[in-house]
Image: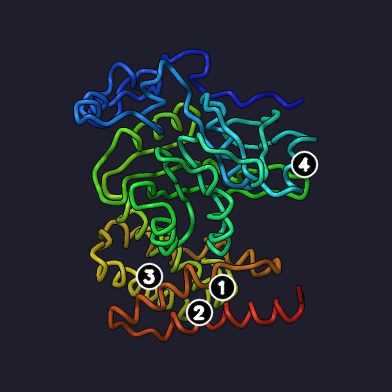
């Protein structure tokens, strides 16, 4: 059996900040007595439930259901288990059998090797009572994901999606109500290997979340605190839509460029005209975001201009890796969405149309070569 994950502060809380932003406790166990928002919540005459119920219900731990136990879901779920969450993974039959037989195994350069038995449920086994449902599926599986988690969602359940793109937000809000859905952005370089082991390929392990209508709330701050307790670099922010747009500008640029040109950012930069091409994509995507009311900062643009101009860069989008492996790609949620938004903003759509056409042609070829 591999050694368990060891959080630097797992032997005690020395060195762990006792207060987060705006004086909010950094440790979940302190929220019940120290968080100022709890009193406000009660004074409004609202019965604590969901995450807030977990904070006020005599020390009850937070109950988290993670949809998927792949690269992202498996890694984040493991860290939340380390933080003390009552957690289960909602998976397909084959992954359930694997997890029941072998447990969940993680390899991480920050925390080392980790392996332990976990609870793995099928969609038919899910019942209500979860405080948070963490969605880690691909965007093209969203409708199946909605059907799978529906039995788990109760009046106080918060749904935290960390999908690529933005289109899933409206779909989830239509399915479960606006108040149930949070915004989330994950940053991690991880993969699920052929043995079922989740491998984090770098020290990236960040999670940013917030209320889609703006502002901070006890529930997002509580979940961020729990995630930090498990070693994730988690932050609750008052402007999650800006963060979502920033990710899409960055991801849409790298996905369109590396998929269309079939190379890493460094290989593209070394090719004649490659840097100018990528910079044009970046600026066009930033213009789309600005049109939607979320302009990118100059620091953001300078950072990504430098990344895209680096001849030694080895960055590729996961979409390119999926394409080259013969897997499904998120053409519509990323490239198709940006193409539509570019048209709505009155921008030149030539580059977006070409990237989208490239990915959709691949989908046609894949369907032809791999009939269902």
* In the depicted structure, whether residue 235 falls above or below residue 225: below
The residue at 47%/73% (across/down) is 335
The residue at 43%/15% (across/down) is 13
Q: Earlier in the sequence, mark 4 or mark 3?
A: 4
* In the depicted structure, whether residue 173 falls above or below residue 309: above
SS state under label 3: helix
Q: Earlier in the sequence, mark 1 or mark 3?
A: 1
Cβ–Cβ under 8 Å for marks 4 and 1: no
Cβ–Cβ under 8 Å for marks 2 and 4: no
3D distance between C-alphas at marks 4 and 3: 41 Å
Q: Earlier in the sequence, mark 2 or mark 3?
A: 3
3D distance between C-alphas at marks 1 and 3: 15 Å
Return the residue nearer the eye: 133 or 299: 133
Question: Closer to the camera: disc 4 or disc 1?
Answer: 4
3D distance between C-alphas at marks 1 and 2: 7 Å
SS state under label 1: helix
Q: Earlier in the sequence, mark 4 or mark 1?
A: 4
The residue at 39%/22% (across/down) is 27
Instruction: Give the residue pinned by disc 4.
Output: 98
- Where residue 12 appears, as percent x and y from the top left, is 47, 13
3D distance between C-alphas at marks 2 and 4: 37 Å
Question: Closer to the camera: disc 2 or disc 3?
Answer: 2
In the picture, the quarter occupied by the C terminus is: bottom right
3D distance between C-alphas at marks 4 and 1: 33 Å
Instruction: Give the residue pinned by disc 1.
Output: 259
Instruction: Give the residue pinned by disc 3.
Output: 282
Instruction: Give the residue pinned by disc 2.
Output: 355
Question: Closer to the camera: disc 4 or disc 3?
Answer: 4
SS state under label 2: helix
3D distance between C-alphas at marks 2 and 3: 14 Å
């Amino acid at each position: 059996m591999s050694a368990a994950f060891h959080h630097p502060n797992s032997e005690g809380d020395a060195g762990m900040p006792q207060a987060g932003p705006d004086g909010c406790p950094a440790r979940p166990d302190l929220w019940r007595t120290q968080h100022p928002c709890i009193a406000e919540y009660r004074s409004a005459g609202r019965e604590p439930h969901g995450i807030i119920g977990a904070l006020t219900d005599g020390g009850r731990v937070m109950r988290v259901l993670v949809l998927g136990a792949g690269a992202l879901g498996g890694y984040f779920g493991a860290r939340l288990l380390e933080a003390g969450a009552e957690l289960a993974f909602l998976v397909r039959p084959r992954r359930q059998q694997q997890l029941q037989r072998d447990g969940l195994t993680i390899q991480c350069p920050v925390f080392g090797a980790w392996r332990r038995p976990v609870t793995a449920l099928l969609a038919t086994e899910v019942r209500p009572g979860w405080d948070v449902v963490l969605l880690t599926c691909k965007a093209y599986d969203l409708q199946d994901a909605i059907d799978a988690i529906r039995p788990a969602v109760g009046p106080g359940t918060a749904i935290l999606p960390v999908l690529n793109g933005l289109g899933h937000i409206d779909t989830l809000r239509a399915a479960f109500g606006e108040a149930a859905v949070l915004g989330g952005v994950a940053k991690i370089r991880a993969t699920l290997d052929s043995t079922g082991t989740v491998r984090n390929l770098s020290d990236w392990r960040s999670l940013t979340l917030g209320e889609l209508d703006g502002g901070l709330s006890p529930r997002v701050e509580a979940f961020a605190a729990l995630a930090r307790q498990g070693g994730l670099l988690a932050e609750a922010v008052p402007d999650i839509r800006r963060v979502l747009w920033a990710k899409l500008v960055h991801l849409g640029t790298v996905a369109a460029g590396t998929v269309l040109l079939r190379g890493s950012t460094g290989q593209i930069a070394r090719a004649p005209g490659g840097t100018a091409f990528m910079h044009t994509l970046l600026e066009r995507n930033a213009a789309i975001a600005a049109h939607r009311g979320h302009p990118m900062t100059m620091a953001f643009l300078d950072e990504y201009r430098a990344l895209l101009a680096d001849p030694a860069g080895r960055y590729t989008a996961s979409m390119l890796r999926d394409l080259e492996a013969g897997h499904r790609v998120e053409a519509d949620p990323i490239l198709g969405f940006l193409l539509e938004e570019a048209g709505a903003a009155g921008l030149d759509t030539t580059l977006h149309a070409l990237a989208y056409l490239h990915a959709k042609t691949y989908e046609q070829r894949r369907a032809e070569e791999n009939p269902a």
